[in-house]
Amino acid sequence: MTLSVVRTCALDGVMPRRVDVEVHIGRGLPSMSIVGLPKSSVRESKDRVRAALDHLGFAIPQVRVTVNLAPADVPKHGGSFDLPIAIGLLVASGQLPARVLQDRVFLGELGLGGELRPARGVLPIALSLAASRLDLILPASNREEACLSVRTRVMSADSLAELHEKLLRGERAPRAVDQQRVSERAEGPDMSDVFGQSMARRAIEIAAAGEHSLLMCGPPGSGKSMLANRLPGLRPPLSESEAIETASIASVSNGGFRLGNWRQRPFRAPHHTASSVALIGGGSGPSPGEVSLAHNGVLFLDELVEFPRAVLDVLREPLESGYVTVSRAARQADFPARFQLIAAMNPCPCGHALDTERCRCRADDIRRYQSRLSGPLLDRIDMVITMQACAHDTIDPSVRPESSAVVRRRVQAAIKRRQDRERSVTGSSQPAHVLARLERSAVNSVQAAVTAFGLSRRARHRVIEVARTIADLDASETVSDVHVGEALAYRGSRVLSS
C-alpha cells in the first residue's frame, strides 16, 4: 500500500474541524514534504517523525514521501499532527495493517524518542466525537481531559511503541466513564476578613447575586482588590454545561486546562499593561483572550484607568453580546465571552481625591485622569461605588464580619428566585419592566430618575435589573421604590461623570 488516510482534527476557535492526513509513498529521491497550508510547527513534524521512527527501530522509506493535510485551504498549526503523520507513514509502508485506521481519530505530538506529548484542544475534540462511533487515540497525559466527555471512546498511550503494540493486538478504545472529579469548591479568601466597608460588601453581594458589573473607586488600601478576590466564592459552582464550556476554552488556550479547576469559576486579573489582543484574543491561531478565559467567571481589572483607553474600549462589544469574533486575513474564529466585569481604580493620580487634606492633585489633573474612561464603557457598568479608607479606631476586631458561607446562602437563594421566575416567563415578549414586576411607585421612581439624571435607555434597563436583584435578595416578589432607590444609589454615588 502506498497511500494511507488518517483522521485527525484541527481547531477553528473552539470548534473542531475534521482534517484528513494523506500519506503517499512514491518514486523519487528520499525526502518528505508536507502540504496543505502547514504553519512552521507543522512543517517541523517531518523531522520529529523521522527521528522518533528511527529511534524506535521502524523502517523509514528511502523514497519520496508526500503528506497532504486536507482540506488544503484551512491553516494548520501545532504539534498534534505528529502522531497521525507517523501512523499514516507506518500504514503506507506496510508496518501497520490498514485496518488500524478504521473508525479512529489520532491526535498527539511526538518527542524525538517516540514519547507522546500532550496536545491542545483535546476536550472540544472529544466532545465532538461523543455521538459518533469513532475512537479517539491520544497521549496518556491527555486522557483525563478527554474523559470529561463521558460518551467518547478514548484510547491512550505513553509512547508510539506502546500504541503500535495496542493497534497490532486489535485493541478498541473503551467508552470513557464518569470519573471521580475534584471538589466543586476550593477553599479561597473569605468575606470574614473584610472589616468595615458595609456599602462595598453590600454591592459585592448584589453583584454576585445578579452577575452585575461593578466599578469600585477609592484610595489605596481601602479594600477594593480584597473584595474583588472574594466575589467568586459567593457564587455557586459551575453547572455541568457551564463547566464544559469553560474547560473547552481553557483547553484551546496556551495555558491549557487543569482538571483541578473543574467546576470552579475562572477569575482572571490581567495586568494593566495588557494589550487589546491579550484581552480580546488573536494571533495567527487565533487564541482566546482574557475575556474568553473569564467566560462564566470574573474578569478583574485593577488600576482600571492605567489601561490604555483604546484597550478598555474593546470590552464594550463583549459586555453586551457575550461573545467575541476574532477576524484575521486567513480566518475568523468565535469565542464565548460571557464574563462579569469587576474593576477598581483610584479617584485621582495620587489616590486621595476624597481627602482634601492629603490630595495635592489639581482639578484639571483629576478630570484628565478620570477621562481615560469613555462614557460608553461607563454606561455599560451596572454599579459604581465610592469607597473610603477605614480608620483603624473604627474597627472592632472582636466583632467578626459575616463569612462567605453566610453571604453565599443569600446569594444562592436570590439566584434560585431569579431562575424560577425566568423559567415561568420563557419565551415572553413582555417589556423588561413588566418581567421585573415593578410596582407603580417603582415605575414612577425610574421615570423620575431618567428625567433628572438623563439616563440612557441602556442605563435605565440596568437600573431595573439591579433593583430586581435587590428585591430577590429581600425575597420580594415585586420591585418597590425602595429597591429602585438603592439601585440608583449605585449609579448616583459615582464620582465619575458618564
Image (tube, rainbow, N blue to C red):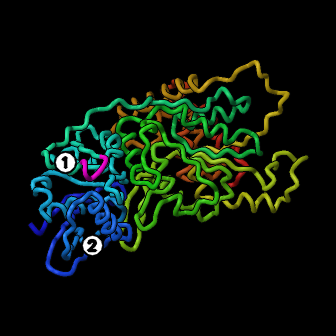
Q: Nearer the viewer, mark 2 or mark 1?
A: 1
Q: Amino acid at mark 2?
A: Ile
Tag shown at residue 360 = none
Name above or below for residue 293 compared with residue 314: above
CA distance for labels 2 and 1: 27 Å
Give left or right: position of 36 versus 295: left
Residue nearest the viewer, comparing 479 with 77: 77
Q: Mark 2 and mark 1 in contact? Answer it, CB < 8 Å.
A: no
Tag shown at residue 165 = 1
Give left or right: position of 195 versus 412: right
Q: What residue lies at 27% left-to-right and 63% top-to-bottom? A: 54
Q: Is residue 437 magenta?
A: no
Q: Residue furthest bottom?
A: 28
Give left or right: position of 247 versus 90: right
Q: What residue lies at 69% left-to-right and 41% top-to-bottom? A: 224
Q: What residue lies at 29% left-to-right and 66% top-to-bottom? A: 50
Give left or right: position of 442 versus 86: right
- Residue position for label 2: 34
Q: Amino acid at mark 1?
A: Glu
Kindly state the secondary structure of the residue where label 2 is placed: strand
Name above or below for residue 393 compared with residue 38: above
Of callouts 2 and 1, the N-terminal one: 2
Q: Which residues are magenta?
A: 158-162
